[in-house]
Amino acid sequence: MYIYIKGKSWVCQFSLKDTKGRLCRYHRSLGLVSDTTKTEAKRQAERIRLDIKDNLDPIKKSNISITELINEYINRSEVDYSLHTLAGYKTFLRNYIEPSIGDIPINSFGSMDIDILINYIKKKGLSVKTMTNTKGLLIASLAYAKRQRYIQEIPDTYIRLPVKPVSQIEILTREQAQLVFEYSKNFKSYLPLMTLFYTLARRGEVCGLQYQDIDLNKGILYIRRHLNYLNKTLQVKLPKNNKVREILMPGGLIGLLKEHIENTPHKPTDFLFARNRGYLYPALLYRDYGRIITKIEKHTGTKIPTSLHAIRHYMISELIAAGIVVLQ
């Protein structure tokens, strides 16, 4: 592209291929006076070039359905989504989008159809987060359709969603936490659960720990990876937000890990809490925690919050009460 001043205004010159592959040269006035900066003139010239290119580039696949579009977006996405995210997208498509608006061709899709989708989700009594995430998948797919020249413009997608209610954070009491610690001793997941409780690490991070991540001399545990298991596929990646970090371990946990390491044959790169397949499923921690709180309720009548985060929140509260600054 070439821009220059002609007389008292800016003009531009560029070339584009037409639908038959022939190179066409264009001369256009930018509608800007000569004292306009060259940077602004370049921006205006690029807008004009893109407008002409859009008109030259033919629309493709304009009759495919919303379901076909989203399937293509998921399978060819430019973003490297995790297996967990992809599984969630497929759930949104199968359970909410496909039954309500899945058959609508993308060239006739409009804002009213998004309203139909949102109302369908509302009638199922699902959360605002589900509405937001489902709508987000739909908008991302429509943006993909525009980039691929399936549609000329993205339809108006503004729909006011209900306000998400403020959720109540569940925190264990000290008595509940003591019961969990005591009853978990009889479960195979005792040591990984104690590691999760005392280090505030996430369950995928605990399952991703290797022997080389434990420095008993310095009392430091290194969080270097996150393990996930989905659709019969093991996925090992960096921790959340790519946040590799080190955690100072309390003395009680150091003693437990030292005994485990000394009594377990291993290589440095082996997973610390490996089961038969060489690693620990993160879902097993939830399963065993559920069994622990069921046993507590059966024996003592005490109800325990079902979320593992309730333990994490309890430990954070205890640290803050002790005057310790918690950084995560």
Image (cartoon, rainbow, N blue to C red):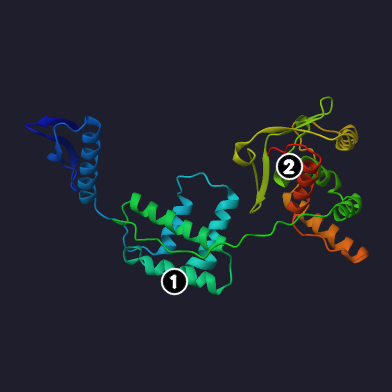
Q: Secondary structure at mark 1?
A: helix
**Quick one: 211 or 267, which is closer to the camera?**
211
Q: Residue at x 56, y 60 (%)?
A: 129
Q: In the picture, which quadrant includes the N terminus?
A: top left
Q: Is residue 37 left or right of residue 319?
A: left
Which numbered tag is attached to residue 201?
A: 2
Residue 156 visible within the image: yes
Residue 320 position in % (x across, y down): 77, 42
Label 2 crowd bin: few (<14), some (14–19), many (20+), radius 10 Å: some
Q: Which residue is mark 1?
A: 116
Residue 256 occupies quadrant: top right
Which residue type carries mark 2? Ala
Residue 146 position in % (x across, y down): 34, 53
Marks 2/1: CA distance?
A: 41 Å
Which numbered tag is attached to residue 256?
A: none
Which residue type carries mark 1? Ile
Q: Residue at x 83, y 55 (%)?
A: 173
